[in-house]
């Protein structure tokens, strides 16, 4: 496999802290708007090699409260 999506996934994985899941804006928009299933937080844009500046999103389980 190769191409921009694979490159983006590899760069986001390399950027993430251990145990964190970073996603791009396209996937964030495709997820259901259901606060009970997903918590998506925008992070500040960062340069990713070969892709320019990308604004990753942090995907988490929703907080219980």
Image (spheres, helix red, strand yellow):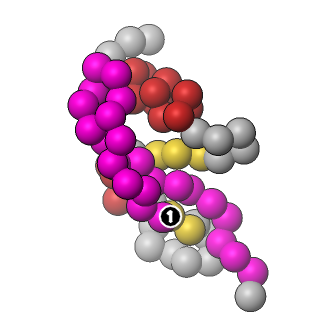
> Helix, strand, or loop for circle 1?
strand
* Farthest-out residue, left: 52
At horizontal 58% and vertical 39% (from top left) the residue drawn is 16
Q: Nearer the viewer, residue 30 or 39?
A: 39
At horizontal 37% and vertical 54% (from top left) the residue drawn is 44
Q: Quadrant of the N terminus?
A: top left
- How many neighbours does mark 1 have within 10 angstroms: few (below 14), some (14-19), or many (20 or more)? some
Residue 9 placement (x, y as % from top left): 46, 30
Residue 37 occupies quadrant: bottom right
Residue 26 belongs to magenta span: no
Measured along the vertical axis of the image, is residue 30 above or below residue 64? above
Residue 58 placement (x, y as % from top left): 53, 55
At horizontal 27% and vertical 27% (from top left) the residue drawn is 51
At horizontal 75% and vertical 81% (from top left) the residue drawn is 64
- 52 lies left or right of 38: left
Residue 25 placement (x, y as % from top left): 34, 51
Residue 61 placement (x, y as % from top left): 67, 64
- 31 lies left or right of 62: left
Q: In this rendering, does residue 33 appear at all? A: yes
Magenta segment range? 41-64
State how many labels appear.
1
Residue 63 belongs to magenta span: yes
Q: Which residue is mark 1?
A: 40
Q: Nearer the viewer, residue 44 or 51?
A: 44
- 10 lies left or right of 56: right
């Amino acid at each position: 496999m190769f191409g921009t999506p694979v490159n983006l996934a590899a760069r986001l994985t390399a950027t993430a802290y251990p145990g964190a899941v970073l996603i791009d804006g396209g996937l964030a928009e495709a997820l259901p708007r259901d606060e009970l299933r997903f918590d998506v937080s925008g992070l500040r844009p960062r340069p990713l090699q070969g892709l320019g500046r990308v604004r990753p999103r942090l995907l988490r389980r929703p907080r219980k409260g």
